[in-house]
Image (cartoon, grey):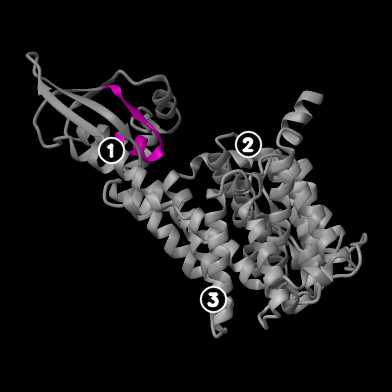
């Protein structure tokens, strides 16, 4: 028990604490911005970021991953908040958490194995682009001071790690935020700060039960939103967990992460927060700043609450330029530059899937749509590729029997190719079809086998099937009609 706790909580104390501090500061403007998108008070997003981070630190399946209020989830809440108000949003958040816990027990996290590497790469690149685009409003129609501060912040972030000793002791994003804040206060620069984004809360969150009627009408209102929130939240969390797995070269428990996200959203709804999920930007900040264990996520959540509630006047003075510099660093570090260099050498299908995922996510700002398109394209390309791996050869034996040898996979994609390989006009008494090196996968494949056998018999040819493997034979016994006289007569219309 104790070795396990030490291994997940206290093996990297300094790195986790410092990384948590950086993430807490980076969470503040994001949470406020997402609250504004959803149409709720800034404190709703800040409370959500606190409770999501704290609960997921204990319940999540991916140590070092940050969960909080996110833009993808906020976009799904706009209509619900506008038409029904905050109380229904809190109720939808609770139901969202319940659905995610159910998904965890149903082991839906295992579905991540159907997401190809090209889709994950496209997802990462799209998020990097969206993170960068989200910073552009802070760099548009501003004075030269903002550009200078942002450039200085990027200089600190990228050059500080090159300084011996100090560069390794302190995370450069944290130093960037502290130094630029001090410079801004000393010089008295008139630039946009965190305080300009919205009023910070001045009290701790309290237990709240949504004041909505507990009836089927309420369920009918919130269920579609809760389902969408649950799906998008799990999708973004699973993808982020996969990315952090790669960054840290460790494995995570995806099903536990589903349950953890559900518990975190239930806690968030009961504390007056909006639904949230894993954040790739903040998770990358955490990892790049040295965070590896659950302690970094807990520190991020607790420090966030302390900062906004007790140190609000100081936090509100942080220049947005400093946080923009940090997020640009995240964008650059998140984007897979290797994928651009590999576009010409990777298979065309992989490149198409990656680019399609990026384009759909960037233009719809909906991660679920992009991943869905990527997965569907991957499936279609795979089916087409496997469908082409089918060979049907034939020879006429000394006894006058035509023997066909089928090699490969027969399913919906290759069934027409399978049928076309047979000569139904050949005047011959006996045909033997050797299926010992073939596999029939679905009812479309069985239907194609029926067509071949029945067409040959219609021409007066006797047909013998040999070599069916056990799995294919089971499908033939259940669904084929060529070996069932009654079914054949029915099929022929008699």
- Measured as percent of width and height from the top left, residue 324 is found at 59, 68
Q: Is residue 111 magenta?
A: no
- Measured as percent of width and height from the top left, residue 131 is found at 55, 64
In the image, the segment drawn in magenta is 435-449
Give the class, few, some or many, for how many residues have Cα within 10 Å of label 1's Cα (few <14, many ≥20).
some
* Quadrant position of the N terminus in the picture: top right
* Quadrant position of the C terminus in the picture: top left
Instruction: Tell me if residue 376 comes above or below residue 58 in the rendering.
Output: below
Task: Say whether disc 1 or disc 2 marks the residue closer to the N-terminus.
Answer: 2
- Please tell me whether mark 2 sits on a helix, a strand or a loop: loop
Q: Are marks 1 and 2 in contact (CB under 8 Å)?
A: no
- Please tell me whether mark 3 sits on a helix, a strand or a loop: helix
Q: Residue under circle 2?
A: 252
Q: Which mark, by number, is residue 451?
A: 1
Quadrant in the picture for residue 450:
top left
Q: Residue under circle 3?
A: 147
The Cα atoms of the two marked residues, 2 and 3, are separated by: 40 Å
Give the class, few, some or many, for how many residues have Cα within 10 Å of label 3's Cα (few <14, many ≥20).
some
The Cα atoms of the two marked residues, 1 and 3, are separated by: 71 Å
The residue depicted at 91 percent of the width and 67 percent of the height is: 203
């Amino acid at each position: 028990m104790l070795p396990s706790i030490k291994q997940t909580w206290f093996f990297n104390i300094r790195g986790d604490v410092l990384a948590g501090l950086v993430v807490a500061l980076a969470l503040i403007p994001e949470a406020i911005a997402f609250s504004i998108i959803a149409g709720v008070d800034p404190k709703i997003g800040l409370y959500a970021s606190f409770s999501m981070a704290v609960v997921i630190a204990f319940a999540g399946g991916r140590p070092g991953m940050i969960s909080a209020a996110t833009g993808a989830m906020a976009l799904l809440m706009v209509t619900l908040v506008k038409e029904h108000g905050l109380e229904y949003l809190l109720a939808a958040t609770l139901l969202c958490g319940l659905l995610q816990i159910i998904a965890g027990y149903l082991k839906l996290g295992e579905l991540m194995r159907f997401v190809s590497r090209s889709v994950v790469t496209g997802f990462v690149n799209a998020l990097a682009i969206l993170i960068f685009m989200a910073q552009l409003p802070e760099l548009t129609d501003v004075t030269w001071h903002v550009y200078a501060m942002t450039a200085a912040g990027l200089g600190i972030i990228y050059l500080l790690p090159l300084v011996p000793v100090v560069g390794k002791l302190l995370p450069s994003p944290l130093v960037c935020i502290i130094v630029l804040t001090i410079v801004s206060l000393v010089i008295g620069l008139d630039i946009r700060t965190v305080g300009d984004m919205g009023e910070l809360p001045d009290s701790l969150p309290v237990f709240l039960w949504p004041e909505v009627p507990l009836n089927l009408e309420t369920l009918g209102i919130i269920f579609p939103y809760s389902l969408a929130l649950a799906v998008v939240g799990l999708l973004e969390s699973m993808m982020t967990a996969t990315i952090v797995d790669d960054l840290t070269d460790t494995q995570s428990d995806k099903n536990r992460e589903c349950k953890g996200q559900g518990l975190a959203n239930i806690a968030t709804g009961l504390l007056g927060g909006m639904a949230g999920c894993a954040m790739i930007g903040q998770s990358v900040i955490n990892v790049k700043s040295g965070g590896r264990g659950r302690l970094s996520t807990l520190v991020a959540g607790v420090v966030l609450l302390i900062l906004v509630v007790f140190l609000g006047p100081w936090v509100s003075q942080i220049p947005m330029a400093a946080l923009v510099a940090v997020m640009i660093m995240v964008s650059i570090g998140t984007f897979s530059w290797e994928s651009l260099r590999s576009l010409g050498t990777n298979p065309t299908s992989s490149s198409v899937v990656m680019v399609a995922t990026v384009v759909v996510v960037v233009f719809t700002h909906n991660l679920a749509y992009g991943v869905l398109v990527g997965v569907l394209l991957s499936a279609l390309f795979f089916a087409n590729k496997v469908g082409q791996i089918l060979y049907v050869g034939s020879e006429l034996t000394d006894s006058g029997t035509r023997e066909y040898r089928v090699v490969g996979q027969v399913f919906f994609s290759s069934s027409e190719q399978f049928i076309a390989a047979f000569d139904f006009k050949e005047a011959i008494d006996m045909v033997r079809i050797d299926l010992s090196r073939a596999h029939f996968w679905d009812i479309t494949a069985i239907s194609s086998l029926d067509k071949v056998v029945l067409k040959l018999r219609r021409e007066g040819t006797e047909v013998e099937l040999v070599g069916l493997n056990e799995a294919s034979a089971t499908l033939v016994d259940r669904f084929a009609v060529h070996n069932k006289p009654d079914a054949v007569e029915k099929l022929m219309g008699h």
